[in-house]
Amino acid sequence: MEIAGSKQKTVLLPKPRGFCAGVIRAVDIVEIALEQLGGPVYVRKEIVHNRYVVDDLAARGAVFVDSLDEIPSGAVTIFSAHGVTPEIRKEALNRGLRVIDATCPLVTKVHLEVLRYSRENYTVILIGHRNHDEVIGTLGEAPGSIHLVSTLADVEALENVQPDRVVYTTQTTLSMDDTNAIVERLKQRFPRIIAPASSDICYATQNRQAAVKAIAEKADLILVVGSENSSNSNRLVEVAQNAGTTAYLIGSARDIQSEWLDGRFHVGVTAGASTPEILVEQVVGDLKERGFTCVREVELIEEDVHFPLPAPLEGLERVVS
């Protein structure tokens, strides 16, 4: 990527970017349910945190709800990729809802870790953002033995932690750098704290952050395509900014402001793990019209992760009332 000193207006497209395996699986689940059953198919919360994806599926018959109370008894109900609490699962069972679980397997891994250690009487420390759907689901697995921390100050304020029986886990979409700082402080406070067997921050989050760091060395502006409520998209902006590069989160090409491009020659464009490639293509097309006619794709990490679909999809049939 030898572009240092070049004055040709260039778009840098890092790979990987955009959809991860968990998002692909979740969106596929809704699409297959709609194909096999037609609408309506009910989805609790946004299937993934991207408005374009949600609006597209809604136009095809998906009905997104905030509460199971909004779903007719016995209806097909899909849980989002972010996971749910045990209470939500119990409520769905009691109401006879026909559940298809689109929870990302990597989120399920975190839930199982929390369950295992809480049952073994450990204090569980969850690193994450309080109001994120994924964190709400994880907290529900062990509300009596789990502590949530989001900052170093939260670590300092921790109380009622068993120093000899303590473990930490994380939200899957956090900033690696910020999380590492919190983990280091946890280790200082609780030297016997147990780490997850493997990182809970998902491979896609780590790879996209690494890719952003790589192009930040060459780009003088980075545009991250993603929704405002997408944790991993917001973290990509922070990673770019921490690397010293100006960065903005945009929902689509319409959000690009002309003054951002003044004096810029190398613009990086990436996308959060819940952002479809079509939105990236539209941003690149807009930049071409603004004079950024050279487009260079930079493959930094090859991803080949795939998650199987849940079994209920195999025999899904519409119930005729």
Image (cartoon, rainbow, N blue to C red):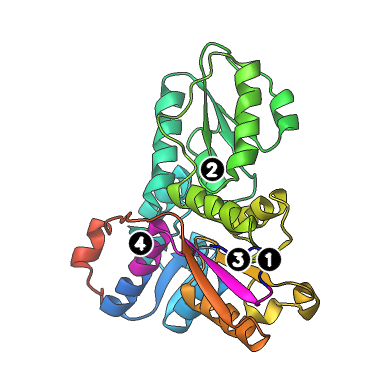
Is residue 107 found left or right of 151 in the rendered image? left
Asked if marks 1 and 3 touch (Cβ < 8 Å), the reply is yes
Q: Is 12 in the magenta?
A: yes
Identify the element where label 3 is drawn.
Answer: loop
Identify the element where label 2 is drawn.
Answer: loop
Label 1 sits on residue:
5
Using a 10 Å C-alpha cutoff, classify the residue at mark 4 as few (fewer than 14 neighbours), some (14 to 19) or many (20 or more): many
What distance separates the C-alpha of mark 1 from that of mark 3? Answer: 6 Å
Using a 10 Å C-alpha cutoff, classify the residue at mark 2 as few (fewer than 14 neighbours), some (14 to 19) or many (20 or more): many
- Amino acid type indicated by mark 4: Arg
From the viewer's perspective, is the residue at label 2 or at label 3 nearer? 3
For the residue pair 289 and 281, the one nearer the viewer reads as 289
The range drawn in magenta is 7-29
Label 4 sits on residue:
25
Q: Position of residue 11 (x, y in %)?
A: 59, 73
Q: Position of residue 238 (x, y in %)?
A: 68, 52
Q: Please say whether residue 225 is visible from this viewpoint.
A: no
For the residue pair 254 and 151, the one nearer the viewer reads as 254
Label 3 sits on residue:
3
Q: Earlier in the sequence, mark 1 or mark 4?
A: 1
- Amino acid type indicated by mark 3: Ile
From the viewer's perspective, is the residue at label 1 or at label 2 nearer? 1
What distance separates the C-alpha of mark 1 from that of mark 4? Answer: 42 Å
Label 2 sits on residue:
171
Q: Earlier in the sequence, mark 4 or mark 2?
A: 4
Using a 10 Å C-alpha cutoff, classify the residue at mark 1 as few (fewer than 14 neighbours), some (14 to 19) or many (20 or more): few
Is residue 246 found left or right of 225 in the rendered image? right
What distance separates the C-alpha of mark 4 from that of mark 2? Answer: 19 Å
Rendered residue at 42%/69% (across/down): 42
